[in-house]
Structure formats: C-alpha cells, structure tokens
Image (cartoon, helix red, strand yellow):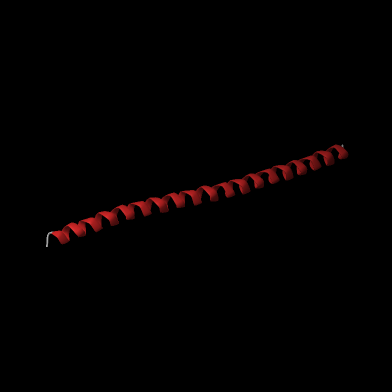
Amino acid sequence: MTATTDFRQTAQYIGFAICTLTMRTAFWVSGILWGIVREIANVVFRVAIGIIVAILSTIAFFGFILWLFTL
C-alpha cells in the first residue's frame, strides 16, 4: 500500500514538473513572438507616420510656393 502511494506521489510530482516545464516553455516562446509582433507593429506605425508627414510637408511646400506667386 505504501509503495503504491509513493509511486503515485512520485508520478504526480513528475507530471507536475513536466506540465510546469511545458507551460514555462510555451510562455517563453509566446513572449518572444509577442516581442517580434510588437516591433513589426511599431515599424509599420513609424513608417505610416513618416509617410503622412512627408505628404503634409509636400502639400505645405507647394502651398507656400503658390502663396508666394500671389504676392
């Protein structure tokens, strides 16, 4: 009876250790993937802001040139 209980408890501890290791590995991998996705989103956002600023600067430049022609 005691040997069966010891074996069951040992198997439970081993199962818990394997489950813990699996979950930690999954969280670690998901953390790395989340970091990559976050960096890609930041780059896309920066590029979009840069394009918008470039378009607005071009419009302002040509608007200034047209305003100078009216003087």
63 in relation to 27, above or below: below
The N terminus sits in image quarter: top right
Residue 25: x and y in percent read: 66, 46
State the residue in front, 31 or 51: 51
13 in relation to 61, above or below: above
The residue depicted at 79 percent of the width and 40 percent of the height is: 11
The C terminus sits in image quarter: bottom left
Is residue 54 toward the left or the right of residue 19 in the image?
left
Residue 51: x and y in percent read: 36, 52
Is residue 16 toward the left or the right of residue 45 in the image?
right
The residue depicted at 16 percent of the width and 59 percent of the height is: 67
The residue depicted at 62 percent of the width and 46 percent of the height is: 29
Is residue 10 toward the left or the right of residue 21 in the image?
right
Number of numbered discs visible in the structure rendering: 0
State the residue in front, 1 or 51: 51
Q: Residue furthest left?
A: 71
Residue 44: x and y in percent read: 43, 49
User: Within the image, what quadrant is residue 2 found in?
Assistant: top right
User: Within the image, what quadrant is residue 46 found in?
Assistant: bottom left
The residue depicted at 23 percent of the width and 56 percent of the height is: 62
Q: Residue furthest front?
A: 69
Is residue 2 toward the left or the right of residue 43 in the image?
right
